[in-house]
């Protein structure tokens, strides 16, 4: 059974249809990268999966259960967690409090809290610091820890490298790689950086104008193919909506 | 509570603060035994201001709900009391039942109105207060803008009534402060602070933002209704234009802004400052109001954290901490 399945999702912003009948599945432990230029519909798709945007049509299944009508706050309890674009920490709290509150809300134990700190040692050094005073890379690490502490079956990460320095991006992806090797959780990574996405994921989908125009494993795709799909220069044979 | 995870949050109130609070409470309880009628009346008014400031701080400072329509519940509380007394309930029972009634009415209101955010929410609450005021004015008992006197209160000896109002006000303020203190240290209080910082991020970690905001909204409505009851018990007259007046929300905003938004002690300090300003300069009419406006502007631009925010940033002293890290708090 797939960890997450999206079936013929259509999402609109008023009269604008941002996602047109997109379907995809993610297997347990798999890392799926969703790439595309600005306005391709990646973030709308991400927000629809997370429950922050109600789809006009289609359904979202988590472990075979239809969660389309489950509100956003109910999804972490079922095992679907997200790291939103821009990190969005609770800036008036410390790092510890940011993670504690997520741990508490989903009823996870102190053991889970400790395990996440073991997986993300950099976060352990930041626990007492105000979240509002962290660097971009540190914030991203804390945002990932905050999502991980809910013990997700599927982890959604939106634009993890956006606004970070190259060094910080390296650190974030090293962290994600360690998580990928060690866990059962599937990951959906929305990313604009093609090279990062291709180097990290097990499978990649490229979106253009609200549709998936290219899908495949990185080893089966060339950089040129992905670039052409990314910019809409050539709507490849792998395309499907 | 977060008791089983990692390092503990700060302990409950530092004993020194608790002892000081009990000493002040004991002194205040005894005031009617040695103070004159005027002092008792004025302190009852201060309790009304304290209640309003604490309730508005709960809403805006902790749950991120900026309301400019809290006068709706202040006025509605008084109206319910008038109606219940008319129906035959003894006045002081009517006050209590009326406040509970306001809290019940606030539940469906919150379910509808809290779907709005920011400016839209603020305006909707203001409109709600005006609609309620107009609706109350249509009641023949209230006689439009003329209002009504709560004649049943005249059955009590004036001194007894004055003292009883005072003690009820003191009990209401103490009770709501204790309730707010424990609410803010609870799981739901922590959730509210997360929502205030970033509602979408709060939802993403499993917080039911609507439910949390509803809890704060209903508690604040109840507190404002109690304040409206105490005001009515003291003045005896009920006039929709006065009891539903926007000035009540302006007072709340001023007190919280001056005292310190999002700090536990801020609204207490703000209410005392406002009370003193009113006592000293209240007879200067328009100049007094202009002065209040100037003070509000000065605080908003030069001291956005209010008096307690300034004290906390300079000394690290956080009286009656709400359990969260406060020294790093940015002022909204």
Image (spheres, coloured by chain):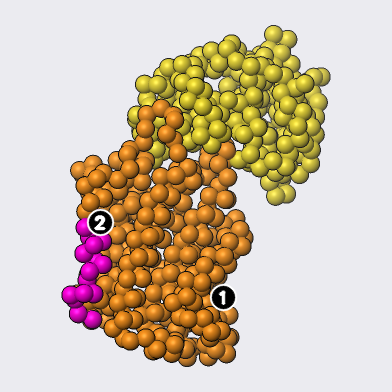
Question: Was residue A92 drawn as part of the magenta stretch in this picture?
Answer: no
Q: Is residue B74 left or right of residue B168?
A: right
Q: Residues within 10 Å of mark 1 (few under 14, many from 20)?
A: few
Q: Main secondary structure of the magenta part?
A: helix
Say whether disc 1 or disc 2 marks the residue closer to the N-terminus: 2
Q: Nearer the viewer, residue B223 or A156?
A: B223
Label 1 SS: helix
Numbered disc 2: secondary structure? helix
Residue at left offset 23%, top offset 74%: B32
In the picture, the disc for residue B289 is none
Seen from the viewer's position, the closer of residues A165 and A46 is A46
**Residue A85 locus on image (x, y percent):** 54, 33
Tell me if I can see residue A144 in this picture: no
Display colour for chain B:
orange
Question: In terms of image quadrants, where is residue A155?
Answer: top right
Name the residue carrying label 2: B22
Q: Is residue B106 left or right of residue A128?
A: right
Which portion, as a residue range, is magenta? B21-37
Q: Which residue is mark 1?
A: B131
């Amino acid at each position: 059974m797939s960890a997450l399945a999206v079936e013929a999702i259509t999402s609109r912003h008023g009269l604008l249809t941002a996602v047109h009948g997109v379907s995809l599945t993610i297997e347990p432990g798999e890392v799926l990268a969703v790439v595309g230029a600005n306005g391709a519909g990646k973030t709308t798709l991400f927000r629809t999966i997370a429950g922050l945007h109600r789809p006009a049509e289609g359904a979202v299944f988590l472990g075979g259960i239809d969660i389309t009508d489950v509100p956003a706050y109910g999804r972490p309890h079922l095992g679907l967690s997200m790291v939103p674009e821009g990190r969005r920490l609770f800036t008036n709290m410390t790092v510890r409090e940011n993670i504690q509150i997520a741990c508490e809300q989903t009823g996870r134990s102190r053991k889970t809290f400790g395990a996440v700190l073991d997986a993300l040692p950099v976060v352990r050094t930041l626990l007492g610091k105000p979240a509002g005073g962290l660097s971009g890379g540190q914030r991203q690490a804390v945002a990932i820890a905050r999502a991980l502490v809910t013990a997700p079956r599927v982890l959604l990460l939106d634009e993890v490298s956006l606004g970070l320095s190259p060094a910080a991006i390296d650190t974030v992806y090293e962290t994600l790689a360690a998580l990928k090797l060690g866990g059962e959780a599937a990951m959906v990574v929305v990313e604009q950086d093609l090279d990062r996405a291709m180097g990290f994921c097990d499978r990649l989908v490229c979106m253009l104008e609200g549709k998936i125009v290219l899908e495949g494993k990185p080893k089966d795709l060339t950089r040129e193919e992905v670039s052409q799909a990314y910019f809409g220069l050539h709507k490849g044979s792998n395309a499907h909506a | 509570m977060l008791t089983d995870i990692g390092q503990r949050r700060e302990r409950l109130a530092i004993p020194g603060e608790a002892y000081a609070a009990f000493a002040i409470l004991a002194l205040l309880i005894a005031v009617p035994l040695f103070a004159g009628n005027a002092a008792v009346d004025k302190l009852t008014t201060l309790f009304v201001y304290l209640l309003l400031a604490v309730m508005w701080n709960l809403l805006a400072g902790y749950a991120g709900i900026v309301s400019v329509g809290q006068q709706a519940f202040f006025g509605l509380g008084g109206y319910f009391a008038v109606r219940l007394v008319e129906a035959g309930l003894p006045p002081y029972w009517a006050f209590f039942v009326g406040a509970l009634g306001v809290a019940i009415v606030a539940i469906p209101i919150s379910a509808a109105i809290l779907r709005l955010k920011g400016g839209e929410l603020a305006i909707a609450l203001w409109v709600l207060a005006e609609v309620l005021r107009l609706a109350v004015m249509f009641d023949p008992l209230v006689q439009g803008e003329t209002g009504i006197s709560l004649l049943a209160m005249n059955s009590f000896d004036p001194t007894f009534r004055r003292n009883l109002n005072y003690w009820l006000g003191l009990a209401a303020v103490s009770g709501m402060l204790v309730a707010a203190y424990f609410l803010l240290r609870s799981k739901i209080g922590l959730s509210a602070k997360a929502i205030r910082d970033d509602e979408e991020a709060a939802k993403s970690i499993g917080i039911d933002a609507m439910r949390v905001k509803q809890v704060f909204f209903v508690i604040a409505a109840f507190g404002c209704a109690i304040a409206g009851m105490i005001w009515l018990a003291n003045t005896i007259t009920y006039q929709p234009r006065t009891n539903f007046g926007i000035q009540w929300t302006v007072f709340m905003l001023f007190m919280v802004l001056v005292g310190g938004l999002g700090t536990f002690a801020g609204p207490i300090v703000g209410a005392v400052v406002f009370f003193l300003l009113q006592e000293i300069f209240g007879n200067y009419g328009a100049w007094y109001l202009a002065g209040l406006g100037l003070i509000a502007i000065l605080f908003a631009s030069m001291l956005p954290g209010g008096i307690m925010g300034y004290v906390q940033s300079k000394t690290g002293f956080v009286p009656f901490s709400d359990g969260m890290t406060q020294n790093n708090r940015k002022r909204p």
